[in-house]
Image: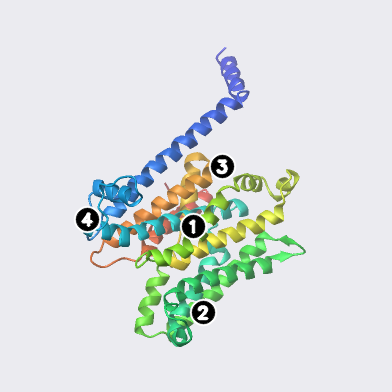
Amino acid sequence: MTTGQTDTAGMRVARDPVAASTRRRRRVGAFLALLAAMLLLTIVVAAGYGAVEIAPERVIAILAGWVGLTTAGQTGDTDGIVLLAIRLPRVCLALLAGAALAVAGAALQGLFRNPLADPGLIGVSSGAAVAAATAIVLGGSAAAFLPAGALAYLIPVAAFAGGLITTFLVYRIASRDGRTEVATLLLAGIALNAIASAGIGLLIFLSDDQQLRDLNFWLLGSLGGVTWERLLPAAPLMLVSTVLLAILWRHLNAFLLGETEALHLGFDVERMKRWIVVLAALAAGSSVALTGIIGFVGLVVPHLVRLVIGPDHRGLLPASVLLGAILLLAADLLARTIVLPAELPIGILTSCIGGPFFLWLLVRRRGMGMW
């Protein structure tokens, strides 16, 4: 009787996919709501904490006055100037870059059906890094030929162009007869990463002391020194690429079944592969152009989300956007406060988190459960 009851209950659960789908949607909705609340809290803390501390209620009042919701928050006093001119651009950059890197990693993992993929895999970060390093080392020689004020934008523009050029080269190498071979794409990315590393090493050898300090700090990643003038040109690129990747969840879900199955479902596989790769390059390249190389965000965040809500990209992509923004905001807060009055490169912190997590993933995938 017990067995029959168990079988009957199991059949009843199996025959009720609507209830299972409802429970799944509620879990995803609750997780997204939790992440949204955590993001708002992290924004207030990150905006208020630092060498000049601003109370959370003052942060909220100043921001509300800045956007015109109230008239109580003073934006012209010391707290207002620090918050709006120094902290807020940095917070916005952390939000956009963290979201862009995380959603790019989630999209590439879905495209390659490989949970160890991230934006650096196809050479975006390395291409941007070698172009920025070239601008740092050789930019002084080019200053005489540039318009006034253009030198400040030389490094971000060079980094963005380097990421796009590298992505184009990888894509051209992997494309043949109108088809893109994913395995060749990955191998080409690895090869170009090695070439870029050699180029960076040569530039480090050629640089002087000041260039070496700038180069090392940029290669280790930092959100310091960002202003509204530097952020505004790159912000639309990060925002648009993030949104477009997030709305491609149906295509990424189809890729999880395999390219042949996705084709049979009516998706234009080759066209979508091109779009996903280009958008991921745009998201990562525009982020790296302002922050330098920040590793492991695109690897760690999608995995953490996947462990909670599963592989469905309808919830995975927006959750990765929120958690990526939270992670980079928290990492930047630690980077600029843990060794006051100095600032720790943010890439060190993300690598300290991502490195052990990557090793845990490798051990877990090999079935050598050590934890």
Q: Is residue 51 above or below residue 10?
A: below
Give the residue at mark 3. 314
> Which sits earlier in the primary sequence, circle 2 or circle 3?
2
- Image point 49% across, 32% down: which residue? 26
Residue under the image location 67 percent in, 54 percent down: 272
Q: Position of residue 78 (x, y in %)?
A: 22, 59
- Closer to the chain start, of discs 1 and 2, is 1
The amino acid marked with disc number 2 is Gly
Q: CA distance from mark 3 to mark 1?
A: 18 Å
Dots 4 and 3: beta carbons under 8 Å? no
Check the image and name the residue furthest to the top.
1
From the viewer's perspective, tell me whether residue 342 is left or right of residue 14: left
Badge 4: residue crowd in 10 Å (few <14, some 14–19, many ≥20): some
Marker disc for residue 101: 1
Q: Circle 2 is placed at which residue position?
A: 199
Pointer 1 and pointer 2: residues touching (CB < 8 Å)? no
Q: Secondary structure at mark 3?
A: helix
Residue 288 in the image: above or below residue 211: above
Distance from disc 4 to disc 3, alpha carbons, whole Å, reads: 39 Å
Q: Position of residue 57 (x, y in %)?
A: 25, 46
Give coordinates of residue 138: x percent, y percent: 46, 84
The residue that label 4 is drawn on is: 53
Residue 132 - label: none
Give the residue type at disc 4. Answer: Glu
Quadrant for residue 9, please give it: top right
Q: Nearer the viewer, mark 2 or mark 3?
A: 3
Closer to the N terminus: mark 4 or mark 2? 4
Gap between marks 2 and 3, in whole Å?
A: 40 Å
Q: Are the residues flagged by discs 2 and 3 in contact, CB closer than 8 Å?
A: no
Label 4 to label 2, Cα distance in Å?
A: 42 Å
